[in-house]
Amino acid sequence: MASRALGTTVVLAITVATAVITLPAAQATTPDRATASPGRAATAPAPAREDFNGDGFPDLAFTAPGGTVDGKAKAGYVGVVYGSKNGLQTSTKQVFSQNSPGIPDDAEAGDAFGSSTASADLDKDGYTDLVIGASGEQNGTFRKAGSLTVVWGGPQGLSGGATLLSGDEEFAGIGTRTAVGDFNGDGATDVVTLQGSNIHLLSGPFGRDGGAASARVIRDMDDLRYTDIAAGDFNGDGRDDLASAVHDGDEYDARRILVHQGGAGGLADTPTTVKRPDGYSLQGGETIAAGHINGDKYADIVVGRIVEGYDSDIDYPRALGGMITYVPGGASGPQGTKAKVFNQDSAGVPGVAEVHDEFGASLSVGDMNGDGFGDIAVGVPGEDIVKKKDAGSVLVLPGTASGPTGAGTIGFNQDTADVPGVAEAGDLFGGAAKLVDANHDGRAELAVGAPGENAGDGSLWVFPSSAKGPTAKGSFTFGHGTLGTVAKAAALGTSFNR
Protein backbone atom coordinates (compact mmCIF):
# COMPACT_ATOMS: atom_id res chain seq x y z
CA MET A 1 0.00 0.00 0.00
CA ALA A 2 1.20 3.54 -0.67
CA SER A 3 2.59 5.29 2.37
CA ARG A 4 0.27 7.82 4.04
CA ALA A 5 1.75 9.63 7.03
CA LEU A 6 -0.45 10.77 9.90
CA GLY A 7 -0.96 14.52 10.22
CA THR A 8 0.46 15.14 6.75
CA THR A 9 -0.54 14.18 3.25
CA VAL A 10 1.84 11.97 1.31
CA VAL A 11 1.29 12.13 -2.45
CA LEU A 12 3.14 11.51 -5.67
CA ALA A 13 4.47 13.97 -8.24
CA ILE A 14 2.03 15.55 -10.70
CA THR A 15 2.17 17.81 -13.73
CA VAL A 16 -0.72 20.22 -14.19
CA ALA A 17 -2.08 22.67 -16.71
CA THR A 18 -3.77 25.71 -15.21
CA ALA A 19 -6.64 26.07 -17.67
CA VAL A 20 -9.73 27.93 -16.51
CA ILE A 21 -13.20 27.44 -17.97
CA THR A 22 -15.60 30.40 -17.94
CA LEU A 23 -18.90 29.56 -16.25
CA PRO A 24 -22.41 30.80 -16.91
CA ALA A 25 -23.63 33.70 -14.83
CA ALA A 26 -25.41 32.78 -11.60
CA GLN A 27 -29.19 32.51 -11.64
CA ALA A 28 -31.10 35.50 -10.36
CA THR A 29 -32.71 33.48 -7.60
CA THR A 30 -31.34 30.78 -5.35
CA PRO A 31 -33.62 28.04 -3.99
CA ASP A 32 -33.83 27.31 -0.30
CA ARG A 33 -31.27 24.70 0.64
CA ALA A 34 -32.51 23.36 4.00
CA THR A 35 -36.00 22.14 4.80
CA ALA A 36 -37.59 20.03 7.49
CA SER A 37 -37.90 16.30 6.83
CA PRO A 38 -39.81 13.56 8.67
CA GLY A 39 -37.91 12.56 11.79
CA ARG A 40 -35.67 15.60 11.61
CA ALA A 41 -35.77 18.88 13.50
CA ALA A 42 -36.61 21.85 11.26
CA THR A 43 -33.73 24.23 10.59
CA ALA A 44 -33.64 27.67 9.01
CA PRO A 45 -32.68 27.83 5.34
CA ALA A 46 -28.95 28.32 4.93
CA PRO A 47 -26.79 28.98 1.90
CA ALA A 48 -24.95 25.99 0.44
CA ARG A 49 -21.41 26.14 1.75
CA GLU A 50 -20.00 24.73 -1.49
CA ASP A 51 -21.64 26.98 -4.13
CA PHE A 52 -18.79 28.92 -5.70
CA ASN A 53 -20.84 30.62 -8.44
CA GLY A 54 -24.03 31.23 -6.46
CA ASP A 55 -26.38 29.35 -8.81
CA GLY A 56 -27.92 27.27 -6.01
CA PHE A 57 -26.08 24.07 -6.92
CA PRO A 58 -23.16 22.91 -4.73
CA ASP A 59 -19.80 22.35 -6.41
CA LEU A 60 -16.85 19.98 -5.86
CA ALA A 61 -13.17 20.73 -5.34
CA PHE A 62 -10.45 18.06 -5.31
CA THR A 63 -6.71 18.04 -4.82
CA ALA A 64 -3.38 16.76 -6.02
CA PRO A 65 -0.90 18.45 -3.64
CA GLY A 66 2.02 16.48 -5.10
CA GLY A 67 1.49 17.79 -8.62
CA THR A 68 4.29 19.09 -10.80
CA VAL A 69 3.48 22.58 -12.10
CA ASP A 70 5.55 24.09 -14.89
CA GLY A 71 8.37 21.70 -14.08
CA LYS A 72 8.19 22.26 -10.31
CA ALA A 73 7.83 18.87 -8.63
CA LYS A 74 5.24 18.55 -5.86
CA ALA A 75 4.11 22.15 -6.29
CA GLY A 76 0.47 21.01 -6.21
CA TYR A 77 -2.87 21.97 -7.72
CA VAL A 78 -6.60 22.00 -6.97
CA GLY A 79 -9.39 21.23 -9.45
CA VAL A 80 -13.07 22.19 -9.39
CA VAL A 81 -16.17 20.92 -11.22
CA TYR A 82 -19.50 22.70 -10.89
CA GLY A 83 -22.94 21.45 -9.93
CA SER A 84 -26.10 21.86 -11.99
CA LYS A 85 -29.66 20.52 -12.27
CA ASN A 86 -28.04 17.47 -13.84
CA GLY A 87 -25.41 17.08 -11.14
CA LEU A 88 -21.67 17.63 -11.46
CA GLN A 89 -20.70 18.83 -14.93
CA THR A 90 -17.10 18.13 -15.92
CA SER A 91 -17.53 20.55 -18.84
CA THR A 92 -17.43 23.37 -16.28
CA LYS A 93 -14.04 22.74 -14.78
CA GLN A 94 -11.21 24.79 -13.37
CA VAL A 95 -7.66 23.95 -12.31
CA PHE A 96 -5.73 26.21 -9.96
CA SER A 97 -2.07 26.28 -9.02
CA GLN A 98 0.10 29.04 -7.61
CA ASN A 99 0.98 29.91 -11.19
CA SER A 100 -2.66 30.52 -12.15
CA PRO A 101 -3.67 34.13 -12.89
CA GLY A 102 -4.66 36.02 -9.76
CA ILE A 103 -3.40 33.38 -7.31
CA PRO A 104 -0.77 34.72 -4.88
CA ASP A 105 2.82 33.51 -4.85
CA ASP A 106 4.46 31.20 -7.39
CA ALA A 107 4.47 27.45 -7.82
CA GLU A 108 7.64 26.08 -6.28
CA ALA A 109 8.94 22.58 -5.79
CA GLY A 110 7.52 21.00 -2.66
CA ASP A 111 4.84 23.63 -1.92
CA ALA A 112 2.09 20.96 -1.74
CA PHE A 113 -0.60 23.44 -2.78
CA GLY A 114 -3.80 21.55 -2.01
CA SER A 115 -2.63 19.93 1.23
CA SER A 116 -6.10 20.77 2.51
CA THR A 117 -9.18 22.59 1.20
CA ALA A 118 -12.29 24.05 2.81
CA SER A 119 -15.20 26.02 1.37
CA ALA A 120 -17.15 28.90 2.90
CA ASP A 121 -18.16 32.51 2.20
CA LEU A 122 -15.33 34.42 3.87
CA ASP A 123 -16.13 37.95 2.71
CA LYS A 124 -19.95 37.70 3.06
CA ASP A 125 -20.64 38.57 -0.58
CA GLY A 126 -23.02 35.61 -1.05
CA TYR A 127 -20.55 33.43 -2.96
CA THR A 128 -18.65 30.52 -1.48
CA ASP A 129 -14.86 30.89 -1.50
CA LEU A 130 -12.23 28.13 -1.54
CA VAL A 131 -9.52 28.01 1.13
CA ILE A 132 -6.41 26.10 0.08
CA GLY A 133 -3.53 24.99 2.27
CA ALA A 134 0.06 24.62 1.03
CA SER A 135 1.87 22.92 3.91
CA GLY A 136 5.23 22.82 2.14
CA GLU A 137 5.38 26.52 1.24
CA GLN A 138 8.73 28.14 2.08
CA ASN A 139 8.56 31.59 3.66
CA GLY A 140 11.89 33.34 3.41
CA THR A 141 14.43 31.01 4.99
CA PHE A 142 11.73 29.02 6.81
CA ARG A 143 11.35 25.68 5.06
CA LYS A 144 7.89 24.11 4.96
CA ALA A 145 6.44 27.02 6.88
CA GLY A 146 3.17 26.58 5.00
CA SER A 147 0.46 28.99 3.90
CA LEU A 148 -3.29 29.44 3.46
CA THR A 149 -4.73 30.99 0.30
CA VAL A 150 -8.32 31.95 -0.52
CA VAL A 151 -9.69 31.84 -4.07
CA TRP A 152 -12.74 34.08 -4.30
CA GLY A 153 -16.13 32.90 -5.51
CA GLY A 154 -18.29 34.97 -7.84
CA PRO A 155 -21.02 34.79 -10.52
CA GLN A 156 -18.53 33.34 -13.01
CA GLY A 157 -17.07 30.89 -10.50
CA LEU A 158 -13.74 31.01 -8.68
CA SER A 159 -11.14 33.60 -9.62
CA GLY A 160 -8.46 35.73 -8.03
CA GLY A 161 -7.25 35.24 -4.51
CA ALA A 162 -5.35 36.43 -1.48
CA THR A 163 -3.05 35.04 1.18
CA LEU A 164 -4.80 34.43 4.50
CA LEU A 165 -1.82 33.23 6.54
CA SER A 166 1.87 32.40 6.10
CA GLY A 167 3.90 30.28 8.49
CA ASP A 168 6.61 32.09 10.38
CA GLU A 169 8.52 29.09 11.69
CA GLU A 170 10.48 26.32 10.00
CA PHE A 171 8.36 23.19 9.47
CA ALA A 172 5.27 24.96 10.84
CA GLY A 173 3.20 23.25 8.12
CA ILE A 174 0.42 25.85 8.01
CA GLY A 175 -2.42 24.46 5.89
CA THR A 176 -1.84 20.78 6.62
CA ARG A 177 -5.39 20.63 8.03
CA THR A 178 -8.08 23.29 7.68
CA ALA A 179 -11.63 23.74 8.98
CA VAL A 180 -14.21 26.52 8.69
CA GLY A 181 -17.11 27.54 10.93
CA ASP A 182 -18.71 30.38 12.85
CA PHE A 183 -17.06 29.86 16.21
CA ASN A 184 -18.20 33.11 17.86
CA GLY A 185 -21.74 33.18 16.46
CA ASP A 186 -21.45 36.58 14.78
CA GLY A 187 -22.61 35.32 11.38
CA ALA A 188 -19.16 35.55 9.78
CA THR A 189 -17.10 32.51 8.81
CA ASP A 190 -13.91 31.82 10.72
CA VAL A 191 -10.96 29.70 9.55
CA VAL A 192 -8.88 27.30 11.61
CA THR A 193 -5.62 25.68 10.59
CA LEU A 194 -2.85 23.84 12.40
CA GLN A 195 0.76 24.76 13.08
CA GLY A 196 2.07 21.54 14.50
CA SER A 197 -0.05 21.12 17.62
CA ASN A 198 -0.99 24.81 17.83
CA ILE A 199 -4.31 26.07 16.43
CA HIS A 200 -4.46 29.27 14.38
CA LEU A 201 -7.89 30.92 14.51
CA LEU A 202 -8.65 33.60 11.90
CA SER A 203 -11.96 35.33 12.62
CA GLY A 204 -14.08 36.75 9.82
CA PRO A 205 -15.32 38.57 7.97
CA PHE A 206 -12.29 38.77 5.70
CA GLY A 207 -11.25 41.62 3.45
CA ARG A 208 -10.48 41.05 -0.20
CA ASP A 209 -6.82 41.40 0.70
CA GLY A 210 -7.19 38.28 2.88
CA GLY A 211 -7.07 40.23 6.12
CA ALA A 212 -9.06 38.72 9.01
CA ALA A 213 -11.09 40.70 11.51
CA SER A 214 -8.83 39.22 14.20
CA ALA A 215 -6.37 36.38 14.66
CA ARG A 216 -4.97 34.42 17.57
CA VAL A 217 -3.08 31.23 18.33
CA ILE A 218 -4.34 28.57 20.75
CA ARG A 219 -1.13 27.00 21.97
CA ASP A 220 -0.81 23.35 22.90
CA MET A 221 0.56 22.84 26.41
CA ASP A 222 0.33 19.04 26.41
CA ASP A 223 2.62 17.92 23.57
CA LEU A 224 -0.29 16.65 21.48
CA ARG A 225 -0.18 15.47 17.89
CA TYR A 226 -3.19 16.60 15.89
CA THR A 227 -4.09 14.27 13.01
CA ASP A 228 -7.36 15.85 11.80
CA ILE A 229 -9.95 18.54 12.65
CA ALA A 230 -13.64 19.16 11.91
CA ALA A 231 -16.10 21.93 12.82
CA GLY A 232 -19.75 21.65 13.88
CA ASP A 233 -22.23 22.94 16.44
CA PHE A 234 -22.15 19.93 18.75
CA ASN A 235 -24.09 21.52 21.64
CA GLY A 236 -26.69 23.44 19.63
CA ASP A 237 -25.85 26.88 21.03
CA GLY A 238 -25.60 28.53 17.61
CA ARG A 239 -21.81 28.62 17.62
CA ASP A 240 -19.59 26.05 15.93
CA ASP A 241 -17.11 24.02 17.95
CA LEU A 242 -13.87 22.38 16.83
CA ALA A 243 -13.39 18.63 17.20
CA SER A 244 -9.90 17.18 16.85
CA ALA A 245 -8.44 13.72 16.54
CA VAL A 246 -5.19 13.72 18.51
CA HIS A 247 -2.46 11.44 19.74
CA ASP A 248 -0.60 12.14 22.97
CA GLY A 249 2.80 13.10 21.64
CA ASP A 250 4.32 10.27 19.64
CA GLU A 251 2.18 7.63 21.34
CA TYR A 252 0.02 6.33 18.49
CA ASP A 253 -2.03 4.26 20.92
CA ALA A 254 -2.97 7.23 23.11
CA ARG A 255 -5.76 8.49 20.87
CA ARG A 256 -8.30 11.04 22.07
CA ILE A 257 -11.10 13.23 20.73
CA LEU A 258 -10.80 16.83 21.90
CA VAL A 259 -13.40 19.59 21.55
CA HIS A 260 -12.69 23.32 21.72
CA GLN A 261 -16.09 24.84 22.40
CA GLY A 262 -17.18 27.93 20.51
CA GLY A 263 -18.21 31.04 22.44
CA ALA A 264 -18.61 34.79 22.19
CA GLY A 265 -14.84 35.15 22.06
CA GLY A 266 -14.36 32.33 19.59
CA LEU A 267 -12.86 28.96 20.44
CA ALA A 268 -12.05 28.17 24.06
CA ASP A 269 -8.35 27.97 24.87
CA THR A 270 -8.80 24.73 26.84
CA PRO A 271 -10.44 21.74 25.16
CA THR A 272 -12.56 19.04 26.75
CA THR A 273 -11.94 15.33 26.18
CA VAL A 274 -14.77 13.08 25.00
CA LYS A 275 -15.27 10.40 27.65
CA ARG A 276 -16.50 6.80 27.77
CA PRO A 277 -19.20 5.70 30.24
CA ASP A 278 -16.48 4.69 32.73
CA GLY A 279 -15.01 8.21 32.70
CA TYR A 280 -11.90 7.34 30.71
CA SER A 281 -11.08 8.92 27.37
CA LEU A 282 -13.00 7.54 24.42
CA GLN A 283 -10.64 5.99 21.88
CA GLY A 284 -10.15 8.37 18.98
CA GLY A 285 -8.33 7.85 15.71
CA GLU A 286 -6.65 9.55 12.79
CA THR A 287 -9.48 11.00 10.69
CA ILE A 288 -12.55 12.99 11.75
CA ALA A 289 -15.71 14.41 10.19
CA ALA A 290 -18.78 16.27 11.45
CA GLY A 291 -22.38 16.36 10.26
CA HIS A 292 -26.00 15.77 11.21
CA ILE A 293 -26.64 12.02 11.28
CA ASN A 294 -29.51 11.33 13.72
CA GLY A 295 -31.73 14.19 12.56
CA ASP A 296 -31.64 16.38 15.68
CA LYS A 297 -30.28 19.91 15.91
CA TYR A 298 -26.89 18.85 17.24
CA ALA A 299 -23.97 18.10 14.93
CA ASP A 300 -22.42 14.67 15.39
CA ILE A 301 -18.83 13.41 15.13
CA VAL A 302 -17.41 10.45 13.21
CA VAL A 303 -13.82 9.36 13.84
CA GLY A 304 -11.82 6.88 11.76
CA ARG A 305 -9.20 4.72 13.50
CA ILE A 306 -7.02 3.17 10.81
CA VAL A 307 -3.74 2.43 12.60
CA GLU A 308 -3.60 -1.09 14.04
CA GLY A 309 -1.17 -3.25 15.98
CA TYR A 310 -1.18 -1.57 19.39
CA ASP A 311 -2.13 -2.72 22.88
CA SER A 312 -5.54 -1.07 22.82
CA ASP A 313 -6.58 -3.43 20.00
CA ILE A 314 -7.33 -5.90 22.81
CA ASP A 315 -9.94 -3.54 24.26
CA TYR A 316 -11.16 -2.49 20.81
CA PRO A 317 -11.60 -5.64 18.71
CA ARG A 318 -13.37 -3.53 16.07
CA ALA A 319 -9.98 -1.92 15.39
CA LEU A 320 -9.17 -4.86 13.10
CA GLY A 321 -8.99 -3.48 9.57
CA GLY A 322 -9.94 -0.03 10.82
CA MET A 323 -13.05 1.20 12.62
CA ILE A 324 -15.24 4.27 12.82
CA THR A 325 -16.73 5.72 16.00
CA TYR A 326 -19.96 7.71 15.95
CA VAL A 327 -20.37 10.27 18.75
CA PRO A 328 -23.75 12.06 18.83
CA GLY A 329 -23.97 15.70 19.81
CA GLY A 330 -26.13 16.91 22.70
CA ALA A 331 -26.91 19.92 24.87
CA SER A 332 -23.63 19.46 26.72
CA GLY A 333 -21.63 18.64 23.60
CA PRO A 334 -20.45 15.32 22.13
CA GLN A 335 -21.85 12.38 24.11
CA GLY A 336 -19.12 9.79 24.33
CA THR A 337 -21.33 7.68 26.56
CA LYS A 338 -23.61 7.06 23.55
CA ALA A 339 -20.84 6.28 21.07
CA LYS A 340 -21.23 3.47 18.53
CA VAL A 341 -18.41 1.62 16.79
CA PHE A 342 -18.42 -0.09 13.37
CA ASN A 343 -16.01 -2.04 11.21
CA GLN A 344 -16.38 -4.52 8.37
CA ASP A 345 -17.35 -7.26 10.82
CA SER A 346 -20.35 -5.23 12.03
CA ALA A 347 -23.76 -6.61 11.14
CA GLY A 348 -24.89 -5.50 7.70
CA VAL A 349 -21.56 -3.98 6.64
CA PRO A 350 -20.25 -5.66 3.46
CA GLY A 351 -16.85 -7.32 3.49
CA VAL A 352 -14.67 -8.81 6.19
CA ALA A 353 -12.37 -6.92 8.56
CA GLU A 354 -8.78 -7.64 7.58
CA VAL A 355 -5.48 -6.16 8.69
CA HIS A 356 -4.60 -2.89 6.92
CA ASP A 357 -7.96 -2.44 5.16
CA GLU A 358 -7.95 1.16 6.47
CA PHE A 359 -11.71 1.28 6.97
CA GLY A 360 -12.28 4.95 7.88
CA ALA A 361 -9.31 6.45 6.03
CA SER A 362 -11.72 8.97 4.52
CA LEU A 363 -15.08 10.13 5.90
CA SER A 364 -17.97 12.32 4.75
CA VAL A 365 -21.50 12.90 6.06
CA GLY A 366 -24.53 13.71 3.89
CA ASP A 367 -28.10 12.60 3.20
CA MET A 368 -28.01 10.30 0.17
CA ASN A 369 -31.64 9.13 0.13
CA GLY A 370 -33.51 12.25 1.24
CA ASP A 371 -34.90 10.76 4.47
CA GLY A 372 -33.58 13.60 6.64
CA PHE A 373 -30.80 11.56 8.26
CA GLY A 374 -27.12 11.92 7.44
CA ASP A 375 -25.39 8.91 5.93
CA ILE A 376 -21.67 8.21 6.32
CA ALA A 377 -19.38 7.56 3.36
CA VAL A 378 -16.40 5.51 4.53
CA GLY A 379 -13.31 5.01 2.39
CA VAL A 380 -11.51 1.66 2.62
CA PRO A 381 -8.49 2.23 0.34
CA GLY A 382 -6.53 -0.76 1.70
CA GLU A 383 -9.27 -3.24 0.82
CA ASP A 384 -8.08 -6.19 -1.26
CA ILE A 385 -10.48 -7.07 -4.07
CA VAL A 386 -10.04 -10.82 -4.62
CA LYS A 387 -6.23 -10.96 -4.89
CA LYS A 388 -5.78 -7.35 -5.94
CA LYS A 389 -3.98 -5.81 -2.97
CA ASP A 390 -5.06 -2.32 -1.90
CA ALA A 391 -7.50 -1.99 -4.79
CA GLY A 392 -9.85 -0.18 -2.40
CA SER A 393 -13.57 0.29 -1.88
CA VAL A 394 -16.07 2.74 -0.42
CA LEU A 395 -19.08 2.02 1.82
CA VAL A 396 -22.08 4.17 2.74
CA LEU A 397 -23.66 3.48 6.16
CA PRO A 398 -27.26 4.72 6.47
CA GLY A 399 -28.22 7.23 9.13
CA THR A 400 -31.25 6.77 11.41
CA ALA A 401 -32.82 8.52 14.40
CA SER A 402 -30.54 6.44 16.62
CA GLY A 403 -27.43 7.13 14.56
CA PRO A 404 -25.70 5.11 11.84
CA THR A 405 -26.50 1.46 11.20
CA GLY A 406 -24.77 -1.30 9.31
CA ALA A 407 -28.09 -2.56 7.98
CA GLY A 408 -28.60 -1.41 4.42
CA THR A 409 -24.96 -0.40 3.91
CA ILE A 410 -24.10 -0.06 0.22
CA GLY A 411 -20.59 -0.61 -1.11
CA PHE A 412 -18.74 -0.03 -4.36
CA ASN A 413 -15.40 -0.91 -5.87
CA GLN A 414 -14.17 -0.86 -9.45
CA ASP A 415 -15.31 -4.45 -10.01
CA THR A 416 -18.88 -3.58 -8.99
CA ALA A 417 -21.34 -3.86 -11.89
CA ASP A 418 -21.91 -0.54 -13.71
CA VAL A 419 -18.84 1.11 -12.11
CA PRO A 420 -16.38 2.29 -14.77
CA GLY A 421 -12.89 0.83 -14.65
CA VAL A 422 -11.37 -2.35 -13.26
CA ALA A 423 -10.07 -2.94 -9.74
CA GLU A 424 -6.28 -3.18 -9.77
CA ALA A 425 -3.67 -3.59 -7.08
CA GLY A 426 -2.67 -0.28 -5.55
CA ASP A 427 -5.59 1.80 -6.89
CA LEU A 428 -6.49 3.01 -3.37
CA PHE A 429 -10.09 3.55 -4.47
CA GLY A 430 -11.75 5.28 -1.50
CA GLY A 431 -8.63 7.18 -0.52
CA ALA A 432 -10.97 10.18 -0.55
CA ALA A 433 -14.76 10.32 -0.27
CA LYS A 434 -17.19 13.24 -0.41
CA LEU A 435 -20.98 13.56 -0.25
CA VAL A 436 -22.30 16.60 -2.12
CA ASP A 437 -25.83 17.38 -3.39
CA ALA A 438 -24.66 18.86 -6.68
CA ASN A 439 -28.10 18.83 -8.35
CA HIS A 440 -29.88 20.17 -5.25
CA ASP A 441 -32.57 17.47 -5.19
CA GLY A 442 -32.18 16.74 -1.47
CA ARG A 443 -30.05 13.65 -2.07
CA ALA A 444 -26.26 13.86 -2.01
CA GLU A 445 -24.14 12.29 -4.72
CA LEU A 446 -20.98 10.39 -3.79
CA ALA A 447 -17.58 11.47 -5.14
CA VAL A 448 -14.67 9.06 -4.72
CA GLY A 449 -10.95 9.55 -5.24
CA ALA A 450 -8.50 6.80 -6.15
CA PRO A 451 -5.07 8.44 -5.93
CA GLY A 452 -3.28 5.19 -6.80
CA GLU A 453 -5.22 4.55 -10.03
CA ASN A 454 -3.05 3.62 -13.02
CA ALA A 455 0.21 3.32 -11.11
CA GLY A 456 -0.31 6.54 -9.19
CA ASP A 457 -1.90 8.72 -11.87
CA GLY A 458 -5.13 8.94 -9.88
CA SER A 459 -8.73 9.48 -10.93
CA LEU A 460 -12.18 10.46 -9.67
CA TRP A 461 -15.62 8.82 -9.67
CA VAL A 462 -19.13 10.19 -9.14
CA PHE A 463 -22.09 8.03 -8.05
CA PRO A 464 -25.66 9.35 -8.38
CA SER A 465 -28.21 9.06 -5.59
CA SER A 466 -31.74 7.71 -5.47
CA ALA A 467 -34.56 7.23 -2.95
CA LYS A 468 -32.76 4.00 -1.98
CA GLY A 469 -29.38 5.65 -1.62
CA PRO A 470 -26.27 5.66 -3.82
CA THR A 471 -26.29 3.66 -7.03
CA ALA A 472 -23.61 2.46 -9.43
CA LYS A 473 -25.93 2.81 -12.41
CA GLY A 474 -25.12 6.10 -14.07
CA SER A 475 -21.78 6.48 -12.26
CA PHE A 476 -18.92 8.01 -14.21
CA THR A 477 -15.21 8.65 -13.89
CA PHE A 478 -13.01 11.53 -14.99
CA GLY A 479 -9.41 12.50 -14.65
CA HIS A 480 -6.48 14.00 -16.49
CA GLY A 481 -7.97 13.72 -19.96
CA THR A 482 -10.88 15.87 -18.82
CA LEU A 483 -8.80 18.28 -16.76
CA GLY A 484 -6.01 18.71 -19.29
CA THR A 485 -3.39 17.68 -16.75
CA VAL A 486 -0.40 15.37 -17.19
CA ALA A 487 -1.20 11.98 -15.71
CA LYS A 488 2.14 10.51 -14.73
CA ALA A 489 2.30 9.79 -10.98
CA ALA A 490 -0.30 12.52 -10.32
CA ALA A 491 -2.19 10.96 -7.37
CA LEU A 492 -5.33 12.80 -8.47
CA GLY A 493 -8.13 12.39 -5.94
CA THR A 494 -6.07 12.70 -2.77
CA SER A 495 -8.80 14.71 -0.98
CA PHE A 496 -11.96 16.81 -1.43
CA ASN A 497 -13.06 20.15 -0.02
CA ARG A 498 -14.75 20.19 3.39
Image (spheres, helix red, strand yellow):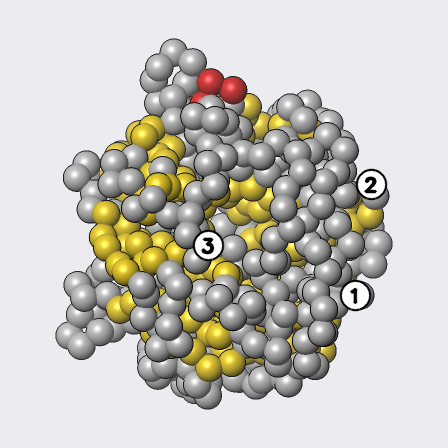
Q: Is 118 situated left or right of 475 in this image? A: left
Above/below status of 481 relative to 183: below
Above/below status of 77 relative to 44: below
Q: Amino acid at mark 2?
A: Lys
Q: Amino acid at mark 1?
A: Lys
What is the crowding at mark 1: few (fewer than 14 residues within 10 Å), some, or many (at least 20)?
few
Label placed on residue 187: 3
The picture places residue 59, in percent across and down from the top left corner, at 63, 65
**Which of these two is toward me, 114 or 381?**
114
Q: Amino acid at mark 3?
A: Gly
How many numbered tags mark residues here? 3
Q: Are marks 2 and 3 in contact (CB under 8 Å)?
A: no
Residue ranking furthest to the top: 278
The residue beneath circle 2 is 468
The residue beneath circle 1 is 85
Point out the tag, 2 or 3, that comes first from the N-terminus: 3
Q: Are marks 2 and 1 in contact (CB under 8 Å)?
A: no
Above/below status of 62 relative to 249: below
Point out the tag, 1 or 3, that comes first from the N-terminus: 1
Label 2: element kind: loop
Label placed on residue 25: none
The picture places residue 275, in percent across and down from the top left corner, at 38, 21
Point out the tag, 2 or 1, that comes first from the N-terminus: 1
The picture places residue 315, in percent across and down from the top left corner, at 42, 17
At 58% from the left edge and 28% from the top edge, which residue is drawn? 342
Label 1: element kind: loop
At 49% from the left edge and 50% from the top edge, which residue is drawn? 1
Report the Cα–Cα distance between label 2 and label 1: 20 Å
